[in-house]
Amino acid sequence: MKVISMIPARYKASRFPAKLMQDLAGKPVILRTYEAAVNTKLFQAVYVVTDSKEIFDLIKENGGDVIMSKKEHESGSDRIAEAVADLDVDIVVNVQGDEPFIDQESLEKVIQVFKKDSQKEIDLASLMTPITNWEEIENPNTVKVIVDNQDFALYFSRSPIPYPRDKQGGATYYKHKGIYAFRKQAIQDFTQLPMLPLEATEKIEAIRFLEYGKKIKMVETHVTGVEIDTPEDLERARKEWK
């Protein structure tokens, strides 16, 4: 089974433009993320996929593999689908460019989903981590996920889900970590499917799979890094790196 990692890297992020080029302990965020993915030694290849000449040149200058997007894309998954179209690969692991704290153990768990799936019933696997801080649960920048009793995703939302009507229900809240592993065919299919209203409303691309009836296997991890969505996250990441 050939497994590669693709890191979509968009320069003009809406909430924090140019965040991937911000300094994190002496190197830009995107380079830290690329090196973290390579250092897991789980992938036959790791590529950054970008629309930015600045990011392209940075990765190239540091000896990395990088692909320039030919088209404008709505999502990172669309960008990856274009990049993998002509590659010989079975599983593609999408690591977000703003996740420099990715770890080997969590990625290995996601890849194992496909190694155990002999019937090839699972299109997509992703990570979730338990959260208990109410500020984080209510923060729209934190995407939450709810799952069934076999850990298949039921829904993703920026709102608190499940809604805590009396806060006594005993549900665990899970944060969705932006790492996806796809079968190659599943990510090719993704780009052929038009965006539907739920994805367009929440601005969460994983919802597209659910709206079209596909299965997403969620894997729990307790490794928490810092995802860099805002300038405040960047400051937290700098402290954590030290």
Image (cartoon, rainbow, N blue to C red):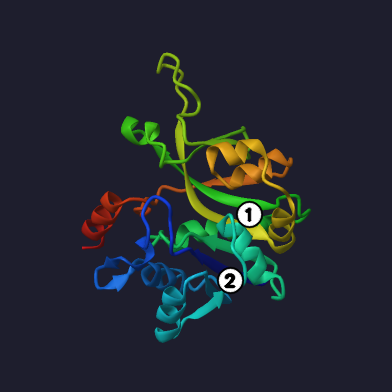
- Above or below residue 46? Residue 63 is below
The residue at 37%/50% (across/down) is: 224
Q: Which quarter shows the C terminus?
A: bottom left
Instruction: Tell me the quarter of the picture where residue 27 sits.
Output: bottom left
Q: Residues within 10 Å of mark 2 (few under 14, many from 20)?
A: some
Q: CA distance from mark 2 to mark 1?
A: 29 Å
Dot 1: element:
helix
Q: Which amino acid is tagged 2?
A: Ser
The residue at 33%/30% (across/down) is: 134
Residue 20 coordinates in the image, percent (x, y): 38, 64
Residue furthest toward the right?
119
Q: Which residue is mark 1?
A: 113
Residue 201 left/right relative to 81 = left
Residue 35 coordinates in the image, percent (x, y): 41, 73
Q: Which amino acid is tagged 1?
A: Val
Closer to the camera, 173 or 202? 202
- Above or below residue 115? Residue 173 is above
Instruction: Tell me the quarter of the picture where residue 234 sits.
Output: bottom left
The residue at 46%/18% (across/down) is: 169
The answer to whether the residues at label 2 and label 1 have Cβ atoms under 8 Å apart is: no
Q: Earlier in the sequence, mark 2 or mark 1?
A: 2
Q: Which quarter shows the N terminus?
A: bottom right
Residue 206 left/right relative to 193 = left
Q: Residues within 10 Å of mark 1 (few under 14, many from 20)?
A: some
Q: Which residue is mark 2?
A: 69
Residue 124 coordinates in the image, percent (x, y): 65, 52
The residue at 30%/65% (across/down) is: 22
Residue 39 left/right relative to 126 = left
Instruction: Tell me the quarter of the picture where residue 13 sits.
Output: bottom left
